């Protein structure tokens, strides 16, 4: 049975629902297809559940530090993982239900639950139903990439999706991967009470960040009792009774780590391998990402790809911005392009890292004349007052244009403070605007103008 619509939206991550609402408001008849959970990765297995777990872990950590603040707690601090999971389920569930309800009650929008796949250039099937539309928007997201490690397929392991559903404290969690997802979970479960070991093949954790950022993050994780093995390649995984054994090679030496559970956090891959993209003639790159232009149009006229599946961003905020770009060009006669977007993201360890623009290493590679300013968080009064002085702030400026080109804010509220810099960069304003601003005391942000008075040549 064939059904016709003006537009079809496949997937309900951050781009899809917002676009569906705009299309309906523009008078279009829209079909939305979702094969599993409404809200995509962010709501179900990403931002919402993990940051809820981060909050619970922080509460446990702060409770153990209560005496530092003159607060006495009688007895040991205990974590009830079933209660932690129940809270996470409630928060994530409310978000998921909100997305689902908003679409199913949207006049002009028909929701179909099931696996959507292309069966022709402008035809999508869900079960025995087929749909046609002049415009099709793909927003199918991504999932954990599973490496080809000998023996891994013979042992149970967690990914980010299954890790958020754990309702117990793993005695010894081995994390394969020392980047953003792996480190957040490592700290979460260490604070819940697990022994945690992180194994990273690269020479250091967070290899895409500057060495000082990597070093500082490693230091505070190790200080909390997390064991880190960098420059270590996993050669085999084996099941041994109720334990798992991971063999690693480092500097030519073979060693073995035995734990109770494994979390695989080695990259992500797009959910594009079972969409029938070849039936629509859609081009993908070597990693399976759907190829798009600067306006997120695919090589097939009338088909767009948004969110994690297009390889142009791997975050909730970039996915939502994809919606804004598509809607602006399609409905508002407003030319917006992906290349105008400034790279920005955060690492939600405690303390967090707020990142925008270029790293110091990237600035050096350009060879441009640049200025740099740094400040230790222990010199920030707000951080000192709160007893959270780990980390530092670093801002980079182009000497000639006076424009800020990048910043790394590792410390208290760094994930929020970074937006002061991001907005200035979008405005195309020189650093002197920030230099002359009067920020509120006592805050972390108040030291940004001070840092702009202390710029020095990048040697």
Image: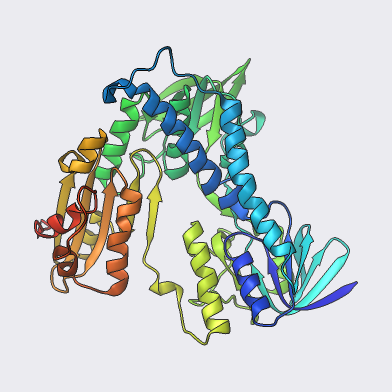
Q: Residue at x 38, y 17 (%)?
A: 73
Q: How many marks?
A: 0
Image quarter in which the N terminus is found: bottom right
Q: Is residue 196 above or below residue 5?
A: above
Which colour assignment does the render follow?
rainbow
- Tell me where residue 111 appears, x and y as whole percent: 76, 64
Q: Is residue 441 above or below residue 165?
A: below
Left/right of residue 200 with respect to residue 362 in the rendered view? right
Q: Residue at x 54, y 74 (%)?
A: 296
Q: Nearer the viewer, residue 128 or 448?
A: 448
Q: Nearer the viewer, residue 322 or 173?
A: 322
Q: Is residue 174 above or below residue 128?
A: above
Q: Which residue is situated farthest in the top direction here?
A: 75
- Tell me where residue 219 appears, x and y as whole percent: 28, 32
Q: Which residue is situated farthest in the right direction here?
A: 1
Q: Nearer the viewer, residue 193 or 59?
A: 59
- Tell me where residue 28 appears, x and y as whole percent: 71, 81
- Can residue 79 be seen in this snapshot? yes
Q: Is residue 285 above or below residue 7?
A: above
- Tell me where residue 68 appears, x and y as whole percent: 27, 23
Left/right of residue 175 with respect to residue 408 in the rendered view? right
Dividing the picture into quadrants, the one containing residue 23 is bottom right
Image quarter in which the C terminus is found: bottom left
- Can residue 163 be seen in this snapshot? no
């Amino acid at each position: 049975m064939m059904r016709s619509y003006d537009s079809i939206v496949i997937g309900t991550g951050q781009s899809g629902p917002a676009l569906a609402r705009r299309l309906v408001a523009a008078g279009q008849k829209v079909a939305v297809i979702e094969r599993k959970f409404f809200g995509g990765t962010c709501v179900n297995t990403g931002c919402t559940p993990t940051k809820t777990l981060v909050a619970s872990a922080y509460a446990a950590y702060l409770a153990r530090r209560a005496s530092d603040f003159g607060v006495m707690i009688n007895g040991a601090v205990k974590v009830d993982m079933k209660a932690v999971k129940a809270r996470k389920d409630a928060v994530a569930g409310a978000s998921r239900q909100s997305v689902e309800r908003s679409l199913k009650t949207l006049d002009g929008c028909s929701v179909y639950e099931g696996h959507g796949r292309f069966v022709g250039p402008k035809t999508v099937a869900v079960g025995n139903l087929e749909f046609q539309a002049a415009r099709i928007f793909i927003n199918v997201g991504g999932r954990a990439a599973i490496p080809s490690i000998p023996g891994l397929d013979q042992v149970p392991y967690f990914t980010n999706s299954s890790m958020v559903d754990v309702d117990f404290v793993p005695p010894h969690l081995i994390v394969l991967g020392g980047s953003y997802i792996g480190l957040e979970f490592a700290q979460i479960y260490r604070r819940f009470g697990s022994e945690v070991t992180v194994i990273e093949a690269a020479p250091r954790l967070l290899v895409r960040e500057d060495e000082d950022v990597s070093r500082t993050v490693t230091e505070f994780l190790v200080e909390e009792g997390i064991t880190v093995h960098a420059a270590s390649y996993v050669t085999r995984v084996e099941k041994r009774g109720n334990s798992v054994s991971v063999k690693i090679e480092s500097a030519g030496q073979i060693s073995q780590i035995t734990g109770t559970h494994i979390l695989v956090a080695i990259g992500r891959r797009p959910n594009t391998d079972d969409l029938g993209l070849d039936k629509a003639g859609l081009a993908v790159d070597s990693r399976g990402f759907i190829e798009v232009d600067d306006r997120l149009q695919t090589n097939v006229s009338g088909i767009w790809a948004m969110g994690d599946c297009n390889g142009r961003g791997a975050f909730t905020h970039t996915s939502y911005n994809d919606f804004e770009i598509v809607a602006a060009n399609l409905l508002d006669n407003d030319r917006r392009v992906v290349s105008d977007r400034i790279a920005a993201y955060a690492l939600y360890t405690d303390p967090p890292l707020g990142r925008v623009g270029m790293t110091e290493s990237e600035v050096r590679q350009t060879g441009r004349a640049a200025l740099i300013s740094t400040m230790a968080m222990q010199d920030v009064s707000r951080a000192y007052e709160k007893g959270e002085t780990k980390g530092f702030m670093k801002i980079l400026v182009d000497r000639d244009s006076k424009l800020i080109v990048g910043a790394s804010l590792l410390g208290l509220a760094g994930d929020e403070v970074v937006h002061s810099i991001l907005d200035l960069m979008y405005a195309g304003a020189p650093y002197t605007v920030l230099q002359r601003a009067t920020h509120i005391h006592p805050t972390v942000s108040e030291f940004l103008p001070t840092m702009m008075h202390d710029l020095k040549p990048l040697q």
